[in-house]
Image (cartoon, rainbow, N blue to C red):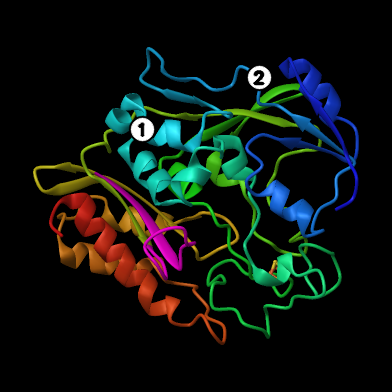
């Protein structure tokens, strides 16, 4: 590992000043960054530890919006009575992620910033446009069983590994960020990006910006939501396919639906057309099957991941059935 400097930021402003310089990275839980540094995938000159910043709170405002600080631990959020009562979908997704030990270290902001688990990205002897732009993509013609079926490019077919982010995309959360230029809000679905010609960029965070938290608007999905994760083993495995499903149901009719998938794209994949198709329909298996077929439009499999083309619609239907209470 390349030698690096390490400092602790004591104020948000000092953290922002520190990360305004090139070669500086933020560290909080470090559950992904330290692995990346050990393997030589990333080699910052300096780490700024932000664990002392006051960004750990979870609160509800008068409008019913849930505010979660960027440094709130994944385990704390998943067990928070406020989250369990107001946004249980988020708690379900967090509990499906990683292991209890990792959830005790990982933060909300770090979860958003974690990088793909594409094996070629971590193997510095292999070509990877994300790690080294212009070097090629080992996965395109390689072992691509875990890879994307939506929104791919000929430069990269990696998936975003988070479960939490799939729930936050479905719930229409917003990300708050701060930098020397001030603060701004990024819709969660715009935070992560598709690979296009620049797979080295995972998200739309500008240089020098610090994630300060996420905000989830008041909604009526608490009663009918479900996170389904399908993986090779029951714990500590990344999703082959996951589905965050949230429904508002009135007298058996769907008033509003929210759907997002994990394990299928370079970003949490929101299923807008399927959501529209569900609005006004009865909350039954037939509606869910139709929505699942609509959701799969534009999907494309590769040599080893074409099984996802069948697995994904089945998972959507199953998640919706659980959300509606008819599974
Ligand atoms: Fe790299 Fe993306 Fe290709 Fe994986 S899929 S090898 S991350 S460019």
Q: Quadrant of the C terminus?
A: bottom left
Q: Based on the picture, tell me whether residue 238 belongs to the magenta stretch.
A: yes
Q: Please tell me whether residue 121 is drawn above or below residue 279 in the rendered image.
A: below
Residue 142 is tagged as none
Q: Disc 1 marks which residue?
A: 79
Which of these two is toward me, 252 or 233?
A: 233
Instruction: Give residue 65's position: percent from left, percent from top.
Output: 41, 23
Image side of residue 46 versus residue 292, left or right: right
Structural distance between the alpha carbons of marks 2 and 1: 21 Å
State which tag comes first along the sequence, 2 or 1: 2
Is 80 positioned to the left or the right of 49 in the image? left
- Tell me which image quadrant ligand 1 sits in: bottom right
Q: Which residue is situated farthest in the top direction here? A: 62
| Residue at image point 12% right, 57% down | 326
Q: Image quadrant of residue 309? A: bottom left
- Marks 2/1 in contact by CB < 8 Å: the verdict is no
Q: Is residue 311 visible?
A: yes
Residue lying at 50% horizontally and 37% vertically, measured from the top left: 104
On screen, residue 300 versus residue 272, left or right, reads right
Q: Is mark 2 within 8 Å of ligand 1?
A: no
Residue 169 visible in the displayed image: no
Q: Residue at x 42, y 71 (%)?
A: 232
Question: Front-most of 184 and 107?
Answer: 107
> How many numbered marks are there?
2
Q: Secondary structure at mark 1?
A: helix
Q: Which mark is residue 53?
A: 2
Q: Position of residue 115 (x, y in %)?
A: 66, 54
Q: Which residues are magenta?
A: 230-247
Determine the secondary structure under disc 2: loop
């Amino acid at each position: 590992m390349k030698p690096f400097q390490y400092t602790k930021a004591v104020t948000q402003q000092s953290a922002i000043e520190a990360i305004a310089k090139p070669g500086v990275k933020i560290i909080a839980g470090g559950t992904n960054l330290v692995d990346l540094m050990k393997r030589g995938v990333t080699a910052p000159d300096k780490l700024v530890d932000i664990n002392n910043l006051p960004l750990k709170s979870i609160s509800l405002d008068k409008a019913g919006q849930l505010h979660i600080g960027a440094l709130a631990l994944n385990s704390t959020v998943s067990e928070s009575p406020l989250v369990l009562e107001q946004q249980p979908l988020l708690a379900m997704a967090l509990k499906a992620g990683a292991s209890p030990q990792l959830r005790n270290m990982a933060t909300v902001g770090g979860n958003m910033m974690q990088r793909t688990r594409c094996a070629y990205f971590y193997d510095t002897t292999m070509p990877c446009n994300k790690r080294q732009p212009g070097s090629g993509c080992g996965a395109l013609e390689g072992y691509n069983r875990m890879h994307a079926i939506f929104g791919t490019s000929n430069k990269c077919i990696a998936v975003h590994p988070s479960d939490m982010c799939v729930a936050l995309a479905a719930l229409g959360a917003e990300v708050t960020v701060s930098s020397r230029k001030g603060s701004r809000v990024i819709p969660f679905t715009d935070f992560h990006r598709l690979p296009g010609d620049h797979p080295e960029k995972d998200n739309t965070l500008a240089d020098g910006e610090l994630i300060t938290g996420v905000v989830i608007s008041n909604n009526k999905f608490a009663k009918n939501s479900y996170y389904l994760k399908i993986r090779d083993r029951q714990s500590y495995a990344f999703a082959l396919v996951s589905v965050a499903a949230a429904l508002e149901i009135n007298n058996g009719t769907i008033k509003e639906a929210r759907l997002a998938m994990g394990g299928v794209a370079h970003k949490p994949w929101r299923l807008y057309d399927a959501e529209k198709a569900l609005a006004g329909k009865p909350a039954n298996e037939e509606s869910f099957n139709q929505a699942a077929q609509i959701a799969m439009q534009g999907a494309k499999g590769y040599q080893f991941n074409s099984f996802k083309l069948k697995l994904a619609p089945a998972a959507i239907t199953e998640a919706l059935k659980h959300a509606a209470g008819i599974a």
